[in-house]
Amino acid sequence: MHEFLQLIKDRRSIRQFKKEQIKDAEIQTIMEAAIYAPNAMNQQKWHFAVIQNKEMLDRMINVIKENMCNSGLEFLAERAKTAEFTPFFGAPTVIYITAAEKAKFAAVDGALAAENIVLAAAALNIGTNVQASPGFLFSSPAGQALKKEMGIPDGYTYVCNITMGYPDGPKPDAKPRNKEVITYIK
Ligand SMILES: Cc1cc2nc3c(=O)[nH]c(=O)nc-3n(C[C@H](O)[C@H](O)[C@H](O)COP(=O)(O)O)c2cc1C
């Protein structure tokens, strides 16, 4: 099989990371891949906050936990209260992808960039996990203050975030995929 197609099939969501930070050259290569994603009208109405500062990540984790507890969603609150819950799985790098709320299809653009990020990382043997619930970060004034600190422009809304680092432990098995979701019309 073509090397790139094999890479797509071999990528797994990684939820255990080494503490060691990934190299600057690696994150730059990965982010270069992100901004080469297809995007509507080449509008590039996306933003990528790459957080590698431990103190800031800890503050983000605390706000996420607090906001999940106050979300009014019982299952999220219960999860956030458990001692072992760590929103970013201890990853040393976390990327928040946001997109201009008013730009048409910008959320699609952001999701495509996310896929470029996880595949570029996989090519460098760097583990990733795409997440959606850490979007709770922004649902309180403390989270909105962090949003500014993260350099996210006004009017940009959360698309997803990606945890990233060198994988620790064995690679998980591939999850089954349902081929019946594809209709071929010839
Ligand atoms: C939008 C989105 C949200 C996700 N949220 C989470 C999450 O909150 N926690 C988590 O562990 N994995 C999350 N994942 C990862 C999926 O669980 C994972 O991609 C899926 O089970 C397939 O496994 P694989 O990535 O190893 O092929 C998310 C993936 C996407 C695309």
Image: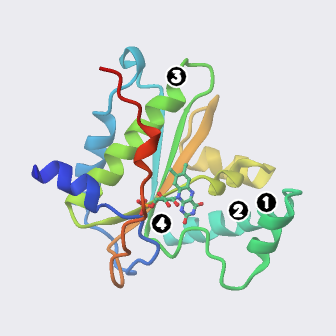
Of the two numbered discs 4 and 1 on the same chain, state the one appearing first in sequence: 4
Density class for disc 2 (Cα within 10 Å; few <14, some 14-19, many ≥20) is many
Which residue has dot 1 on it? 67
Residue type pointed to by label 1: Asn
For the residues bearing labels 2 and 1, Cβ distance under 8 angstroms: yes
Report if residue 80 is visible in the image. yes
Residue type pointed to by label 4: Asn
- Check mark 3 vs ligand 1: CB closer than 8 Å? yes or no: no
Q: Residue at x 44, y 78 (%)?
A: 16
Which residue has dot 3 on it? 105
Residue at disc 1, secondary structure: helix
The answer to whether 27 appears left or right of 15 in the picture is left
Of the two numbered discs 4 and 2 on the same chain, state the one appearing first in sequence: 4
Q: Residue 153 location in percent, x, y?
A: 57, 33
Residue type pointed to by label 3: Phe
Which residue has dot 2 on it? 64
Q: Residue at x 78, y 62 (%)?
A: 68
Q: Residue 77 location in percent, x, y?
A: 82, 67
Report if residue 25 is visible in the image. no
